[in-house]
Structures are given as structure tokens and as C-alpha cells.
Image (spheres, rainbow, N blue to C red):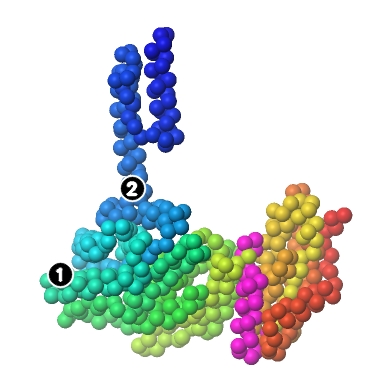
Amino acid sequence: MNESYRLGEQSIIAHLQRLANGTSTAELDVAALPTELRSIGEQLQKTLAVLQQERQLLERSAYVDSLTNLGNRGGLDRHVDQLWLKGTPFTCAYIDIDHLKHCNDKFGHAEGNRYILGICRALTEAMEHDEMLFRIGGDEFVLVSPTTGEAELEQRLERTRTDLVEATSDGKAPMIASFSFGCSHVDPLAGDTRRQMTMDADRKMYRYKLMHRVQQPKEDNAPMRPIADQLPCNDRVFQAISMSSETRYPFILNLDTGESQWSVNAVRDFGLPSQHPYNSLDMWLARVHPEDRDNVHAELDMVINGTWHFHYMQYRVMDATGAYVLCDCTGYRLDGTDTEPNMYVGMIINRSPADTTDSVTGLGDVHALVNAIGEMRRVPREAGFIAIKIDDIAEVNARFGFDAGDRVLAESAACLTDCSRGKGRLFRSTGPTFVALFDDLDPEETNAIAEEIERFLGSPVLIGSLEYQPPIRVATLHLDAVDRQPVSILNELKALLKEAPQVPGTKLD
């Protein structure tokens, strides 16, 4: 093999390595290769060109919306990642097309696509040169501006929307075109978070929709919906109530038809298919933790068949991220009349927002516990507290590792959830200590649950080949009314635990 041929081979190998490492996008210099390698170089260039084209197509499908040619959700995430890495402040606008479902249902999806493209065109024409628009869902857009402030962007979008409404209100267009929006300014270097940005813009957008959404003209001969098929509450009023709290989710279920109403926050936080799903009981039960599902199903059946008119339970529900969060669920059955359906109406309270959830057990942490005790001070009523301490966790961690200790705590939390029968609010206070809060329980009921916890909470946990039963201490506190600071109550529970006898478990000596 001559020196020229060897150098040519090395040139081809080096070129391929640079492409693989992403350090070069240049083409191979075929003319510089020895004569006997040029045909191989030409074939290699053709193959690389095909691969490059396929890569571009894959990248386009990953980051570009096929209908509008805007960036999609993946494109938005990539763009925001770049701004975040640079620490660049920016303003984002979450934009939601009004009445897209109505357009699709009444005029067909082809007209719906034209409606989307028309609004997309209006938004694009209103953008500044350094701004980017993304379509992240069927009727959802996000506009990102690195230079425009929140108030200025709101004014520009308001002008664009007003022009759209005026241009399509003459009766010639199938739909009056409009959109709702909410803007939020974020500064990564100031400690702002993406979750704050999304929630702020989302909340403002839904508030805008409630206040300003354009109503489509009604047909003169449109038939009235039968009473059983009507939504049980004015949608705008219901959503306005829903916006009053991020972690409280009102719902209304028509027991005769299966139709339901859910808050926009519930749709977002639990990944519900829509605000008005059918068969919503089955939909909700599918999200309930498998260990809690039978009890929840049994209680809801009692409400549906009219045996019970009030329902309250605390149990775990899967959220939109796939994690289980602890929820208080309270509901009332309203019996129907000749003109009104049977309804089930209630409120779900998320006790485990991301920043107050213990990552090991899924229960609320000490911050959530302090907040819950603070809430109980506002309304005078009886309250029962049960404190539980798992002894020897430090020894388990030292001997078997922290994963084993976490498993003991997680299984203890699951057993505590079963023992509380969904009637209390559960928290991991500090370290190996848990606290259960019970509203309106007398001392006898609280003590009965504490005795059940003593019998069942120390269930064996398999650690390697060892069947380990954790030793525990249980203490109760009953108050006619919560009239003290949370710290005072927690200190009293700590003192009671210190004096409580230990329920023995496996000795690790």
C-alpha cells in the first residue's frame, strides 16, 4: 500500500470522526483523495447527503408543527432551554384560540385548520423580528419575546385580537375569529422558575377567556338541549370559581348522563381529557392509587345509588406527571326532580403540591403540616392528632443503606394510609415521624384509629433476606379547638412520643 493511499484512508476516517463528534459539517474533499479512493469518496458523500436529509426530516418532525410550520412543544422547550442557559430575561404569552371545538364540530376539521392558520397568520404579522411563535397543542400557542415587556406585549396582542374580531364579524366568515391570552415575564437569574412562568401565564390566559371570550352568533332555529343533557352550571361562572385557588378543584357530575364539569386546573394538574368528559367516575378511579381504589370505589357506589348523600375521603391520585399526590375529596349528592338531574357536586383539594411533598413517602411534608394546622385554627372545631415515630431508622440506614430506610418509611406511610381509612390528613413531619390530622373526631374515635395503627403499622418489611418489623411509638392528642400555634402543637406531640411506650419490633443488635 503506497503512502498516498494510506493518507487518503486516514483523511476519510478523520472526516467521519469529525461528523460523528459534531465538530464539523463540511463535505469531504473528494478531489484531494488519491485516484483509486475517489469513487469510494463520491459514494460516501451521496450516502452522507441522504443521511443528512433524513436527519433534517426527523428533527423537523421533533421540533416543527406540520400544519403551521411553527415550532411545536419540543421546539419551545429547546428554545426556552437556550434562553435559560444564557440567563436571558424574556416574556412569554400563552395564547388559546376561542371556540376551535365549535368550529370543528359545526364546519368540519378542514375549516378548523383554516381557522387555526388565520389566527396563526395574524399573530405572526404582529410579531417583532426577535420573537418566536410556537404551536404546542391543537388550539394553544406560545409567543416568546426576549425584548418586549409584559404590558407592551399585552397591548400588542389586544390590538391584534380586536382587529381579528372586527374583520370577521361581518357575517361573511364562518366564525368570528378571536383568541385569549396571558403574559408572564421571567428572569432566570433572579430565581424565577419555569413552573412559575407557566402557571402565571396560564392563569392570566384563563382569566382573560372568562372575561372577554367572544360569543358566536346563535342560529335562529337551533333546538334547545334537553334538560338532562345540559351542563349543570354556567361554564363561565364555574371556571371563575375554579380560578380562585390553584390546588382546589371543584367538579360537577350529572349522575343521569355521566357528563361532568372539571376545573381548568384539574385538567392541567391531573391530565384529564377535557373539562367536560363523560364516564368521569371511571376516568377518575383509573387515576386513584391501586391500594386506595377499592375503598374509594365502594364509597362512591354508595353515593351513586343514593345510600349516602355525603362523601369524604383522603387518598392518593396520579397527577399529570405520573406521580401520586395526596388529595382530600369531599362531595354531596343532590337528588333530581322532574326537571333536574341527579348530581354529585364536590371539591378535591391537592394536599401535595410539588414544593410541600415528601419525596420518599408521597405524603405532605412538615411545611404542609404547619399549613394544615394553621387552616384548622380558622374554624373552631374538635381535632384529633396522632403522632407516629418509626424507631431504629438510623440503625437501618447504617446497616443496610438509605434505600432500605426509605423503603421502611414508604411502606409505613402506605400502611398508615390504610389504617386512617381516608378520614385523616397524613404528613411526614420530620425524619421518621408521621402525623395524622382528623377533623371533627371525638377522643374515642381518635384512640380507636391509634390502636389500629399500633396493631398494623409495624408490618414486616423485607430487607434482603431479613424480614424486618420496625419498632414504633404512637401518641394521641385531642383538642376541642385548635387555638395554638402549629409549632406549639408539634412540640407537644414530640413530648408525648418521647413518653409513649415502644411497640417492639425486630432487634438489629
Look at mark 1 in the image and give the residue it sits on: 173
Q: Nearer the viewer, residue 139 or 26?
A: 26
The stretch drawn in magenta includes residue 299:
no
Q: Amino acid at mark 2?
A: Ser
The N terminus is located in which quarter? top left
Q: Nearer the viewer, residue 509 or 93?
A: 93
Residue 205 lies, in percent from the top left, at 36, 72
Local SS, label 1 = loop
Label number found at residue 61: 2
In the rendered image, which quarter contains the C terminus? bottom right
State the residue at coordinates (65%, 89%): 381
- Residue 171 falls left or right of residue 120: left
Q: How many marks?
A: 2
Residue 80: % across, % down = 41, 57
Q: Residues within 10 Å of mark 1 (few under 14, many from 20)?
A: few
Give the class, few, some or many, for how many residues have Cα within 10 Å of label 2's Cα (few <14, many ≥20). some
Q: Is residue 422 above or below residue 441?
A: above
Which portion, as a residue range, is magenta? Answer: 359-383
Left or right, 396 with reference to 33: right
| 2 or 1: tag closer to the N-terminus | 2
Kindly state the secondary structure of the residue where label 2 is placed: helix
Q: Is residue 344 visible?
A: no
In the rendered image, is residue 214 in sight? yes
Q: Nearer the viewer, residue 27 or 72?
A: 27
Relative height, residue 465 to residue 114 (above, below): above
